[in-house]
Image (cartoon, rainbow, N blue to C red):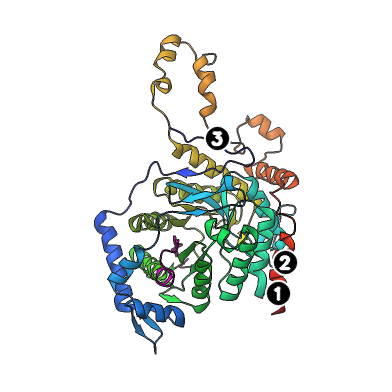
Amino acid sequence: MRESRTRDPRSTWIRSLPWNFTVDVLSPGDLAKLHDNSLAILDKVGIALGWAPAVDALADTGARVDRDANRVFFPPELIEKQLALAPSSFLLAARDPALDLRIGAGHGYLATDGCVADIIDIDTGTRRRSTKQDLGDITRLADALPQIGFHWQPVSAGDTPNNTRPLHEVQVQFLNTAKHIQQMTVIDGENARGAAEMARIVAGGAEELRRRPLMSNFQCSISPLAWEDGPLEAMAVFAEAGLPVGVCSMPLSCATAPATVAGLLTIANAEILSGIAILETMHPGAPTFYVSYATSMDLNSGALNLGWGPEELFAEMVCTQMARRYGIPSTVGTFGTGSKFPDWQAGVQNALSGFAKVFAPGDMLTAAGSLYGDRAYSLEALVLDAEIFDLLCHFADGYSFDEDHLAFGPISEVGPGGHFLANPHTLANMRESWMSGLFERGTWEDWEEAGRPSPVNGARVRAREILGSHEPLPLPDGLENELAKVIEAQERG
């Protein structure tokens, strides 16, 4: 049965991908091999880690520490113990409570991509550096799209100072959305403290933020098998504020990971397990999530493989299975084509990756709107990706086979040679079928007369309409100035 679509009339209903068709791509035996191999790497090879507070806490908890080499070795029992501390579900709160997301409850929610440096200008079609205004515009567009459940920072606020850029990004997003914000550009303690303070201001205080975390965050390891000080300190700051903190690995096969899929996944899993162990050692019971972007290198150029295919899809599906095995929510890439335009390649890659998540679902699904391997962002692509996601959600909602839907009565009434156009059963049920608002559905002649438009044209029109009309839920009076003061204080040093 389809889920209820009744929502608070104050806000837009958020589309989610239900976990109705979950399958495991790895056998239990291969899943155990991957887990055991990851534990062996952590125990025998270890992780490069020098941040003293984490090293000291791990040493007190049972890790073996080589301080001269800045290497920490994690016994298997330590990893298993710390994994057990992580909750299986948590809240991603929104400024509008009707847009709250319960993570770990069997639904996947879509987000924009993260911190792309360039944007495809919607007016000129040219690629240029992104600005704070661009980030605000994309956030406002995504705020209006029911398929987008929460926000990453889709583009960089490239016209703001480097040392406070993440805070400018937090500020402009709070001004342009009532949905949850997942901060992913803070990678140091100082900006983490500023971002957490801004979230406290918007939430109405530290305790209210703990009760309703309006922001979450994740931090990335450095493949292979290393953690830098800044991300670990940021992780600790956000966890102390009561915000969910994910742990991310981004290995690249043949470069920062082995060439084989199994080796690539071993590196990713080991790094994520190490980060979760560090987090749960420093802040037991902290909400966390499993974030893997295991990808491949283009052997012709040495760059990220923009023509990714089966290996990447398989790796994504395995990573959500690993997270389910650990009982921890997951984040997984679902869009993010390598194409430079929302074209055939973009449609194929994003649709295949999206359908993979129907059968190997994650809790948080990312990268809507991204092009060129996360190096260019497109408002049209965001609208098109939302359309793909809507199709996937409709499929995953499932189809009823109750007496009414089996339609024995109407079939008997119409009989051989008749039609169902005017049958009351058709009128009662025909709107259950999904229908695209962007796919080309007209005749050839109509298409020719209209100038041979593509779905990109329709997406452009829709994006402009939303940007011209949508007004996000405003912040209470005075809060915009309070957020600006946090940035000013940090820029003064």
Residue occupying the point 55% across, 53% down: 93
Q: Residues within 10 Å of mark 3 (few under 14, many from 20)?
A: few
Residue holding disc 2: 484
Left or right of 429, for residue 136? right
First along the sequence among labels 2 and 1: 2
Q: Which mark is residue 6?
A: 3
The amino acid at mark 3 is: Thr
Residue holding disc 1: 489
- Residue 447 point in image, percent of width and height: 66, 34
First along the sequence among labels 3 and 2: 3
The alpha-carbon separation of the residues under discs 2 and 1 comes to 9 Å
The amino acid at mark 2 is: Ala
The amino acid at mark 1 is: Ala
Q: Are marks 2 and 1 in contact (CB under 8 Å)?
A: no
Q: Work out whether 222 lies above or below 10.
A: below
Q: Closer to the camera, 19 or 217? A: 217
Q: Which residues are magenta?
A: 278-302
- Quarter of the image where one finds residue 475: bottom right
Q: Quadrant of the C terminus?
A: bottom right
- Residue 76 point in image, percent of width and height: 28, 71
The answer to whether residue 160 is seen in the rendering is no
Q: Please, what is the dominant secondary structure of the magenta stretch?
A: loop
- Residue 82 point in image, percent of width and height: 35, 67
Q: Work out whether 330 lies above or below 424.
A: below
Secondary-structure class at tag 2:
helix
The answer to whether residue 79 is seen in the rendering is yes
Query: Residue 489 lies in magenta, yes or no?
Result: no
Residue occupying the point 52% across, 62% down: 243
The alpha-carbon separation of the residues under discs 3 and 1 comes to 44 Å
Q: Residues within 10 Å of mark 1 (few under 14, many from 20)?
A: few
